[in-house]
Each structure stands twice: as structure tokens, then as C-alpha cells.
Amino acid sequence: MSIPHDSSRPDPDALLAQVQAGERRAARGKLRIYFGASAGVGKTYAMLAAARKLQADGHAVLVGVVETHGRSETAAMLAGLDVLPPRAVEHRGRTLAEFDLDAALARHPPLILVDELAHSNAPGSRHPKRWQDVEELRDAGIDVLTTVNVQHLESLNDVVGGITGIRVGETVPDTVFDQADEVVLVDLPADELLARLKAGKVYQAPQAERASKNFFRKGNLIALRELALRRTADRIEDDVRAYRVEQSIADIWKTGAALLACVGPNPGAEHTVRSTARLAGQLGTDWHAIYVETPALQKLPAARREQILRTLKLAEDLGATTAVVPGRDVALAAVEYARSHNLSKFVLGRSRSSLPWQTPHIKRLARYAPDLDLVEIGAASIDTPAGARAASTGSAWGADATADADLDPGGREDGYGERGDLRVPGAARLPWHQQRATGYAVAVAASFAIALAAMPLLAWLDLANIAMLFLLGVLLTAVRFGRGPSVVATCVSVACFDFFFVSPRFDFAVSDFQYVITFVVMLAVGLITGHLTSGLRFQARVAAQREKRSRALYEFARELSGALQTEQIFDTTRRFIENAFRARAILLLPDADGRLLPPPAGMVLDIGIAQWAFDNAESAGLGTDTLPASALFYLPLVAPMRTRGVLAIAPLRQRWLLIPEQRQQLDTFAALAAIALERVHYIEVAQNALVNMESERLRNSLLAALSHDVRTPLTSLVGLSESLAGAKPPLPDPQREVAEALHDEALRMSAMVANLLDMARIQSGEVKFNLQWQPLEEVVGSALRASGSQLTGHHVRTELPKDLPLLRYDAVLIERVLANLVENAAKYTPPGSTIEIGAALHGQWINITVADDGPGLPPGREEAIFEKFTRGERESAKPGVGLGLAICRAIVEAHGGRISAAAHASPLGGAAFTFTLPLGTPPAMPELEPEPEPESEPKPAPEPEQKHKPERA
């Protein structure tokens, strides 16, 4: 019998992801973006209006930064709002007013207004962009209201530039916009906006006139408005889709599979990346960006490879998963990557040119994968600068890149091998153009050398064998110098074979037509052999690099697995980082307070940047968006439980930080080091816990034995001293005082032993609690009566509300807690001091406080005084062994509460000890039946009125 499937049942994985996303959102501040098509539509005004309404409703609002641009209406909205003073920054002789991030974090308002999200901060600021300041505010739990225009979105930057002819330099990643909690569209028709511009409500008169002739043309404003509406509609569509998932609505619309953007060295690669980001945002799906590095493309000059890596970095900033994929065939490697990652849609740029005999990549993709969708992106609207066009003569995804096929793959002047790997230091290498010329020269010389060596052997060797010798030279040339020199060697070898060995000799004329076929076959075999050999050489080098990376990770993990001390992990990590990446590295570890320890002498770094990376668990410095001007790269060591340190790296070349594979390997190294540090930390914690447990067990055994053995003679001593003091006839005064002093000391010794015994019993779990529902007033009174002798000379008062509920506790033990706290206050305050006992309800708990007006607690010892054998004054003549507060904590925690101490937190000005007890639900009191009223006795009937007769005389 089949069980019907309930399509309305929520997906557990989706629910779990929803709960986790909700927890992450709850921990961060909310972000509301006021979004518009251009300046002047009223975004800042709408944001200030919302802030004033929130303030009127009783919410605290802080204006972090608002740009009025001289608009009187906007400036008037600031009246009555709390404005944060700006931070003055000196830059090139000018004083700039910037948003003060540190002051905002210090004030920590519930809500802050930060205008112009895409603003670029002044040099020297913590973050290059204001949106990064906003992200840090949100991480601190602060809600943010902000504004942004459509032209500042990264994915629409080139589109807006093509419409208006003006490329905006300040952009915001689309991920920030998409992850905002709320987007409010501030819309205004183009005619109304132009009217506002003419009236001087957008810019001042001179600036407004220039704007109306350039950016603020009606056609531009209409197009920008359409883009803003479409982008907002995409956002609303995402909200609708999220609502369907949240409500478990069946048969939801599927957006399709993820996208794969194919990036090449052509100038339009950035346009392809941005277009793919917009398409992925519209479809609500993930996307990947890859660059396929063939033997030909692998030999590109350094400038073009830098451009490719910058394009991949742009794709990563826009939310893509990036990779550099080696392969001989661009289309085949892309199809293999797509199938392995379940990507069904290709996005690639349009080919600019193609030789007649070359098949465009889009057709080859269609032939290799007919089941995959192909999306071809048109050329960018804005022309690429001439320098960029000159630097790009071929494209992996436009025209086939074959112009540099004869470059030597190992000879770039940037010091990197294939795919950006650092070369071994000390290996002398010529610049790539010199190696290229050397390869061609060797190819020509090798062909002539084979011809000269074979001429004396002509009498013994057939022409076919001599042709094989030339092919051997072509093969060796291809192995050593690559495809270009092998082609030259093939052509020169055919010419030498014809000139020196085919009759008529020493002449290029051919007497037999069959030799023409021989020349053609020889040329074809040489070219094919050189091509295959060069490809195998490239694949071998790539495989060697992969094996090198895998071996480095294996050896690093093996070394860390045997490390038992932090110093071993420190040395191992530094050594492997330096060997694998040819970079100086230092490992910064935190102290007990979470502050990074300074580096050893000889390593210059910015400890402030390292501390920021540690606190925020994000990389910073070189190659990142946080303080990228730094010369070092700071990578936090994030372990499963917490961040364990920071890895500071000074690379010999900055370029390798842009390579995805290098960053992935570095992240793997950092993760292994973090896990090793966490493992060593918990080994130390376990060892310390074991030692503490054994020490505690031994101490409790000694305390129990001592208290039992001493208690009986102490009891006898107390009784004898009391009998002696009350002996008949009375003792003389000196002897009586000695007897009373002996009795007091015996009582004090007996109390100490009782404390020792009680502590041992509580920690051993032998104490049975007698929990009863009873009022607090009774136990307070009994504790004061028990401590009467110690409270002589002190003023004691109680502040207990009359409506306190019944509490469930052990009266004897809680009396002991109150007595210890009151006696402790009397002991450490001078005579005449005031001691107050108070209680207050706090949620589901009751807080009971014993405070005084004495000197307070020693600074920094609020927690230490609750440890066993710890006293408030280390060197003191006051009696005691330091167990009273430890017993209080053990009793309170056994009741499910907590106890704490605060210095100078008492309303009286001294120390205050507060412990909590759970309220619970008292049992219902039985209702008593009302007693029946006694029946009243019937009243006697009134006697008849008698008339008095006058008496007779």
C-alpha cells in the first residue's frame, strides 16, 4: 500500500535553512535602502521623514551623515534630530568631513542614518567605501537607513554609462543591495524631476545648468527610471519567492539552473561578467565564472593575465564562484566544468573576429553539449580604451587566441609560472621575448646541424631514414621550446631535406613529383607532432603543479597532526607558507582577553589591521576591500568554535592574491592551522580540567577527614570552656576573661570546621534539600537573629516589598547564605556602618541583595572572592579561612540561581552581593469554606402595654 505524498508538507532542509538565515539576520542590524533613479528624486528627504516619524514614536535616532547639497527642504528635515559630528580628514591640503565610524560604534544607537551608500571614503579611512562602514555597523547590531541611485549598482554601472555617456566611479556590490532587509523605491517622473532641477531644488544654479545639458536629459531620466523600476521589481520578485518558501506553497515557479560565465582576455570580459550578474539576479540563481587557460593563452604577457585576474576578481565581488581551468580545448574544458557543477546555461561574449578556418567557440559548445543553453552577450556600449584594445589581439571567447601561440610558456617577466605559481628563487630566467628569440634560433640551428650531420651518412642511409632524423629534431624542439619554435623547425627541416638530400642536390628544384608528397607529409607530421608535444608539455606542467599543491597540503596536514604545542604549529605554518607561496609569514595569536600579541622583532606589520581581521573574522589588507593599501595580507584563522589567530603574509608578488586557486589553497592552509590550534587548546583545557578534578577530589577528601576528626574535640572544648566560664564560685575577673576568650575562639574554630564539612558535603552531593514553598521574610528574620552577635555596632535594615510571592527553597541553607553575607558585610565594614537587605522581582527571578556602605570590594576581584580559601583582603587580621562566599555560591547554584558581587554598586556606596532564585508557580491554596453564622435566638414577644392607673390615696 502506497502512502500518498503530501505536497504541502514543508521541506525540512528549507525550513532549517530558513531558521539559520533568520538567526543570522537577527544577530545583525537591519538595512533599509531608499532607492531612486537619479539624484533629486527625494531619497534623502524620504529617509529623513521616516526618521522623524520613528523619533516621534519614541525610537532613538542618530544622523550619522546626511548630504543636503544645499537643498533647503532637506536641511529643514534635520531640525530636531541628533546629528553625529563629522570626522575631519586632511587630504591634499583640504579638510574633508567624513563619517565618524568609531564614534558611531561607541554611541551604538539603535538606528543610524548614513546617506550616499556608494560614497568613497577619504584615503586613510578604515574602509575605502561607505557601504563597508555600513556593514560594520550592521555587524555591531545597529539598524541603518541609507540611500543609493541606480547608476551606483555594480551590475548596472556599464549599462548606465552606455545610456548617459558618463561612467560613475563609485559603485556598490549588488550583494549589499540584494541582502538589504527592505528597499524603498522613491520614484519621480522625468518631467517633475526636470522641473525641480530648473527651480534649483536639486543643484545650485551653475551646477544645475551643466547637469541639464549632460546627465539630466529627459531621455536619460526615462531610461534610468525604467532601470530602477525593473531592479525594484526583481527585488519584489525575490521577496515573493521567499514568501512562498516560508509559507511552504506548493508548485512554486522554478528560476532555472545556475549560470556559467566564460571569461577570456578580450576587452569585453567585464561586460560579460556584469551582464551575467544581472541575469543571475533576475533569475534568482547562483552563477560561476571561469577562465580556461590553454597552452596558447597560458603564454600571454603579464599585462593581459593581470586583466583576466581582475575580471575574475570583479566576478567574485559580484557574487560568482570563480576558477581557472587548464585545458587544451576551451570549449571542451568549459563543458566538462559545467557538467561537473550542474550548470545548464552558458553566458559568453560575442566573437569580434574569426578566421575562416576557425570554428567559433559558441558553435563548438553547441556541438559538444547540445542539451545546454547558450546565451551570447552583445558588445559593450562604451568603447574600450585604445590601450586595452591594443593589448588584446585575441580572445578565448571571441576570436580564437592564436596570435601568441609561439610564446614560451615559462618566460614571463613577472616571475610566475603557469597559472600564476611563483618560481623557485635563484632560477635564472631570461625575459619572455628573449627566450622566444632563443627558441627560434635553436630551432633553425638544430635543423642545419642535423643536415650537416646527415650528409656524410647519405651513402649508408636511405632518404626516409634521413627524414626521420629531421622529425626527431622537430620533436625535441617542441619538447624544449614549445609550439612556435617547432613550427619553424619543421619548415627549416623540410627546406634542408630538399636542398641537401633530394636530387638535384643543392637546389630547391624537384625532379620527381613524389618528393613533393614527401615534403607535404613531412611538414604535416612535423606540425602535428610539435602541436601534440607542446600540449602534452603544458598538461604535464599543470599536473606537476597540482601534484605539488596536493603534496604541500598533505605534508602540512601530516605535520600539524603531530603538533602538541602552539609553538610547533606556529613554526610549521610559517615554514610551509613560506615554501608554498614564497612569502614571509607570521602567526599572531590572541591573549586571554582576545587581544593579539605583538609580533617578534624584525616583522613590521600593522597590529590594528590584524586585530580588526581577528575581531571580524574577515581578511583585510592587501588584495581585499578593507585597507587594501597595506603591504601585508591578514587572514583570520577561523576554527569551528572561534577565531584562533591571524596569519599575516607579505608576498613577494601581489599578483598571486588575485588567483582563485592560490587563495583557495591559502584558505585551506589557514583552516588546517586553525583546527590544529583549536585541538591543542582543547587538549590543554582537558589536561587542566583533569588536574583540577583530581586536586578537588583530594582536597575534599582531606577536608572531610579533617572536619570529622576535629569536630568531636572541638565540641568538647566548647562545652568545657562554657562550663569553666560559668563555674561556681565565679572565677576572678582575669581568669573569667581568659575563659570567655577561650570559649569565643572555640566557637569560631567550630564554625570554621562546620564550614569545611558543609563545603565537602555540598560538593560531594550528599546534602539532601528540603525544598518547601515559604515566604522570604521568615528566613531573613531568622538569619538576622542567628547573626546577632556579629552585627553588634551596625545598623541593619530590610527593604522587602509586601507583595513578594512564596518561594521554593531550603530554609536552613538559604538562612546560611544570608547569614554568611550579612556577617561578611559586618566583618569588612567599620562599626556604625549600615547593612541593607533588599529584594526585587525581575522577570521569572527574584533578586536578593545584601549591600553596605563600607569601602567596597578590591578592584578586579569581584569573581575571585567566590573561590574557596579566597578572602577579600589577602593580608588581614580578620578571622576566617575564605569559605563563606564559596558555600553561598554552592548553595545558590544548587537551587538553580546565581550569585554575584559588585564593587561600589550598592545604593549605599559600598559592596553589594546579589543572588537570584527562580520564582516558579506556587501551589494553589485550598479555599476555606465560610463558617456558618450562628442562628440568632428569637426575640421575646413584646409584652402588652399596661396602662398605669393612678394609685389610690
Image (cartoon, rainbow, N blue to C red):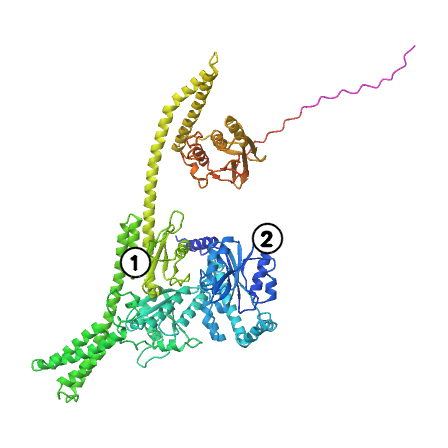
Residue 68 position in % (x across, y down): 57, 65
Residue positioned most to the right: 953
Whether residues under marks 1 and 2 lie with C-beta atoms below 8 angstroms apart, the answer is: no
Residue 386 lies, in percent from the top left, at 39, 78
Question: Is residue 371 visible from the viewing direction of this image?
Answer: no
Name the amino acid type tagged 2: Gly
Q: Which contiguous range is marked in magenta?
A: 934-953
Q: Is residue 379 above or below residue 926?
A: below
Tell me if 869 is positioned left or right of 106 in this view.
left
**Residue that protrudes farthest toward the left in the picture:** 460
Label at residue 577: 1
Residues 385 and 859: in front is 859
> Is 942 included in the stretch rendered in magenta?
yes
* Horizontal and vertical percent position of residue 744: 45, 23
Disc number placed over residue 58 in the picture, else none:
2
Question: Badge 2: few (under 14), some or many (20 or more) residues near its Cα, within 10 Å?
Answer: few
Q: Give SS at disc 2.
A: loop
| Image-quadrant location for residue 190 | bottom right
Three-letter code for the amino acid on which mark 1 is drawn: Ile
Residue 324 visible to the viewer: yes
Viewer-side residue, 562 vs 18: 562
Q: Secondary structure at mark 1?
A: helix
